[in-house]
Amino acid sequence: MCAMQESISIKADSLRRQVSRSPRPMDIYLIRHARSTWNRDGRVQGHRNPPLSDEGKTSARHLAEYLRSRFGPFSQKKSILVASPLRRAHETARILSGRLNLPVARRADLREASLGEWEGKTVSEIRQTDFRRLARWYRDPTRVRLKGGEPIPVFQKRVRREVQRLLYIYGEAESLLLVTHGGWISALLTDVVGIPLGRMWTFVLDNCSLTRLHWDGKKFYLRSFNETASSTGRTVLLA
């Protein structure tokens, strides 16, 4: 466990002690939203709000069945479903909600990083007009500043802060299902596995994929990475 990951665990534990809660084990399901119309078109999304594609809606239904059959049932008293308010994530969560019988809560800080001037453009367009910065972005996004965007180190701080809040707010739950975004999950995983933030694109996450963590009350353990309900998805099972 890297020092930064330990700092997340210690801060969250301290918050919970303030209200006399004992740290409890929790299974955390990190779900990247299903395929949107802009994913289909290769368009940069960030804080923009495209809907799910038809393919995405179908994938979300398949994921719901996978979650229910492999990990369910999910009790409303012990399981919490929380989503980013961006449409592609919230629509994914609503599909899961209907099949898992869990209400959806929304948290603003589960949003993706804002990508400013690149939002709305296709990757092909950016490659033609901003090739050098795009290449740096893929090598180390902490070295790129986008006009109107959220610097990646600032984004990581937002992710860490939200993790602390979620552990505090939902500390009595046994299962926490978070429907969020690829960048959000990748930023968190750099802490969990102990690699520099600049290597966050090491984690290639499919749309509608599942990555599982276990929180033991002090630290996180990575249980699986990029599970999908599709036979074509890349899956790494660790436990």
Image: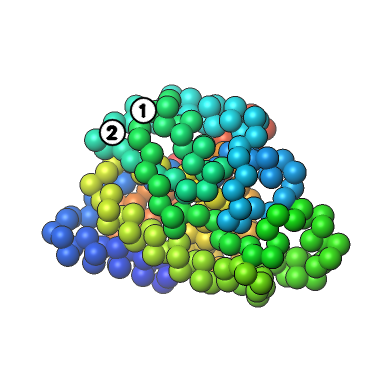
Q: Residue at x 61, y 37 (%)?
A: 52
Tell which of 200 and 100 is nearer to you. Answer: 100
Residue pointed to by mark 2: 76
Task: Locate the C terminus by quadrant.
Answer: top left
Q: Amino acid at mark 1?
A: Asn
Q: Quadrant of residue 148?
A: bottom right
Q: Residue at x 86, y 62 (%)?
A: 128
User: In x, y percent, where is residue 228?
Assistant: 57, 35
Q: Residues within 10 Å of mark 2 (few under 14, many from 20)?
A: some
Tell which of 126 and 48 is nearer to you. Answer: 48
Horizontally, residue 225 falls left or right of residue 99, namely right
User: In x, y percent, where is residue 224?
Assistant: 49, 44
Q: Residue at x 30, y 68 (%)?
A: 11
Mark 2 to mark 1 CA distance (whole Å)? 8 Å
The reply to whether the C-beta atoms of the residues labelled 2 and 1 are less than 8 Å apart is yes
Residue pointed to by mark 1: 101
Residue 60 seen in this snapshot? yes
User: In x, y percent, where is residue 166?
Assistant: 34, 54
